[in-house]
């Protein structure tokens, strides 16, 4: 079977609210960071690979009273927040050892992808990966799911997609990929086991 993992919120931590709460004591500053950086359309363009990090920093500075250096410092705090979810990696290792093929489908900017590549070694578990900034498409756009199936040459009927956002797993379903919303590693493993049992019973 093919098990496709998202990264942020699944393999590494990703919580914009927590990032802002840890970065700023002042609620007003947290709101600025959320509205003008993490939830701004520019963040999606970073994910898409159509906006460079330095330009995004300059744009964010122009939308706020922050200096480019202050925005850059916040970007670094965002990177540092991408901590490994060890229980998910352990699950991935078990799935890989059981003979299942693992793939990666994630929205991720170039600079964050480079940080994760430097920091962690879980990449070897994936047979292939599709990252938004490298293909110019983002979840939940249909094109990125079509690209995944073609690029990885996988059968959607034999595949499950794991993501922490319901909209992203829902977008995989029309392609015939089984959607699995991630809450935590234990819940995910139980849901995977149930799906695998169902597949086995149908065989």
Image (spheres, helix red, strand yellow):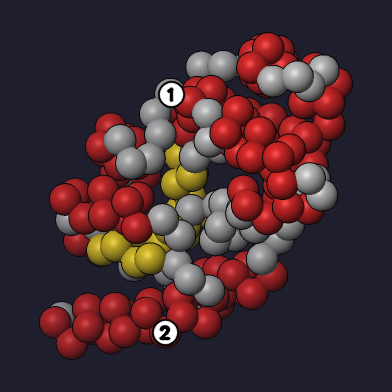
Residue 4, position as x, y percentages in the image: 41, 57
> Residue 142: x, y in percent?
25, 37
The residue where tag 1 is placed is 136
Residue at screen point 60% across, 28% down:
36
Asked if 122 appears above or below 51 in the picture, the reply is below
- Vertical relation: 164 (above or below) 92: above
The numbered mark, 2 or 1, whose residue comes first in the sequence reads: 1
Quarter occupied by residue 64 = top right
Quarter of the image with the N terminus is bottom left
Q: Where residue 2 sits: x, y (%)? A: 36, 62
Hey, which quadrant is residue 34 in on the image?
A: top right
Q: Residue at x 49, y 40 (%)?
A: 107
Circle 1 Cα neighbour tier, 10 Å, few/some/many (<14 / 14–19 / ≥20):
some
Circle 2 sits in a helix, a strand or a loop, which is it? helix
Q: Which residue is mark 2?
A: 190
Instruction: Tell me the distance, in whole angstroms, between the alpha carbons under discs 2 and 1.
Output: 33 Å
Drawn side of residue 26 relative to residue 162, left or right: right
Relative height, residue 28 to residue 17 (above, below): above
Say which of 173 and 166 sits in front.
Answer: 166
Q: Residue at x 31, y 84 (%)?
A: 194
């Amino acid at each position: 079977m093919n098990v496709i993992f998202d990264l942020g919120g699944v393999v590494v931590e990703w919580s914009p609210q927590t990032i802002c709460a840890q970065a700023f004591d002042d609620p007003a500053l947290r709101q600025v960071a959320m509205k003008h950086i993490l939830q701004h359309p520019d963040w999606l363009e970073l994910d898409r690979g159509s906006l460079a990090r330095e330009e995004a920093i300059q744009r964010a500075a122009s939308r706020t009273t922050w200096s480019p250096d202050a925005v850059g410092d916040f970007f670094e705090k965002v990177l540092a927040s991408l901590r490994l979810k060890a229980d998910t990696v352990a699950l991935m290792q078990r799935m890989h050892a059981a003979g299942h093929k693992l793939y990666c489908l994630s929205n991720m900017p170039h600079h964050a992808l480079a940080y994760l590549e430097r920091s962690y070694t879980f990449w070897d578990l994936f047979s292939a990966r599709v990252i938004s900034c490298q293909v110019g498409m983002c979840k939940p756009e249909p094109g990125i799911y079509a690209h995944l199936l073609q690029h990885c040459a996988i059968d959607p009927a034999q595949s499950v997609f794991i993501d922490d956002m319901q909209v992203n797993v829902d977008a995989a379903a029309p392609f015939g990929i089984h959607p699995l919303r991630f809450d935590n590693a234990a819940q995910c493993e139980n849901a995977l086991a149930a799906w695998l049992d169902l597949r086995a019973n149908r065989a």
